[in-house]
Image (cartoon, grey):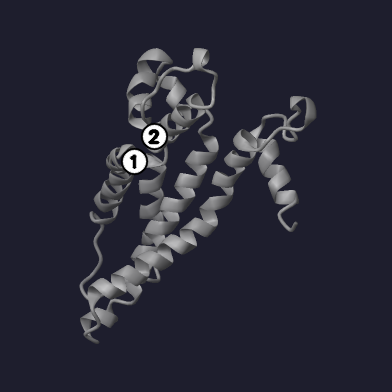
């Protein structure tokens, strides 16, 4: 129940603004009647504008979720006593300060930007390119739309995942003996190491 509630709150506070911003920007554009926009940069420009303005909205939810699970791993006398990720999200701004919810957010912001700009671009491109499948060939629009959303999600995830994984590497991977960090606790050093060793 806790996970379901937090998932709904995250969807309302993170995913919904992204989709609304994309609809606001892309839906406000115009093309000539019966004109296919698949050869234009409109998809990429609109998607980038929408993703750039909302790529930060997921940070508070991700940090609250991590704070909740991290709190459970501390000794009893050091715990904050969060009862759920939602409880952590509501308490942290007053107890730790609002800035706490945005700490260490660069990799997640970059990952979110790459994912959503890619997702919106791929989806709107394919919808514009393959309109004839449901307009002239009587294929079910819902099935075609489901396929386009699946492919868009796959392509966007392949582009964005390395930056999310980079944060996992730096924040969650065990440190070396003596607490030494391979990347000196720097996201920049971590991504350089990631690029240099990506073939292994």
Graded by Cα atoms within 10 Å as few (under 14), some (14 to 19) or many (20 or more), the crowding at tag 1 reads some
Q: Is residue 94 above or below residue 3?
A: above
Asked if residue 78 shows in the view, the reply is yes
Can residue 37 be seen in the rendering of this structure?
no
The x and y percentages for residue 42 are 36, 60
Which label was assigned to residue 86?
Answer: none
Residues under labels 1 and 2: Cα distance?
8 Å
Residue positioned 54% across, 22% down in the render: 74
* Residue 22, position as x, y percentages in the image: 30, 51
At label 2, counting other C-alpha atoms closer than 10 Å, the crowd grade (few under 14, some 14-19, many 20 or more) is many
Q: Which of 34 and 144 is in front in this view?
A: 144
In the rendered view, does 172 fall on the left or right side of 183? left
Q: In this view, does 134 lie to the left or right of 50?
A: left
Question: How many badges with numbers are in the image?
Answer: 2
Instruction: Check whether the beta carbons of the residues at disc 1 and disc 2 lie within 8 A of each other.
Output: yes
As drawn, which residue projects farthest toward the right?
177
x and y percent of residue 49 in the render? 38, 47
Q: Mark 2 points at which residue?
A: 61
SS class of the residue under badge 2? helix
Picture layout, residue 70 above or below residue 144: above
- Which residue corresponds to the image point at 25% horizontal and 82% vertical from the top-left? 139
Question: In this view of the protein, which residue sits in the foreground, 102 or 132?
Answer: 102
Q: Name the residue under label 1.
A: 14
Dot placed on the residue nearer the N-terminal end, 1 or 2:
1
Q: Nearer the viewer, residue 142 or 64?
A: 64
92 vs 28, left or right, is right
């Amino acid at each position: 129940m806790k996970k379901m509630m937090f998932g709904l709150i995250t969807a309302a506070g993170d995913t919904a603004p992204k989709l609304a911003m994309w609809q606001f920007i892309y839906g406000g554009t115009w093309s000539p009647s019966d004109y296919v926009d698949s050869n234009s940069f409109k998809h990429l420009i609109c998607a980038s504008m929408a993703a750039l303005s909302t790529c930060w909205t997921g940070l508070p939810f991700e940090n609250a979720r991590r704070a909740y699970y991290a709190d459970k791993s501390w000794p009893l006398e050091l715990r904050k006593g969060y009862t759920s990720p939602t409880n952590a999200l509501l308490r942290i701004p007053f107890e730790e300060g609002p800035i706490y919810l945005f700490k260490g957010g660069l990799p997640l912001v970059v990952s979110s930007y790459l994912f959503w700009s890619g997702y919106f671009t791929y989806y709107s491109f394919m919808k514009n390119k393959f309109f004839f499948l449901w307009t002239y060939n009587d294929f079910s629009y819902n099935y075609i739309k489901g396929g386009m959303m699946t492919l868009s999600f796959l392509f966007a995830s392949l582009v964005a995942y390395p930056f999310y994984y980079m944060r996992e590497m730096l924040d969650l991977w065990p440190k070396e003996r003596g607490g030494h960090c391979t990347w000196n606790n720097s996201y920049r050093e971590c991504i350089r190491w990631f690029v240099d060793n990506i073939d292994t």
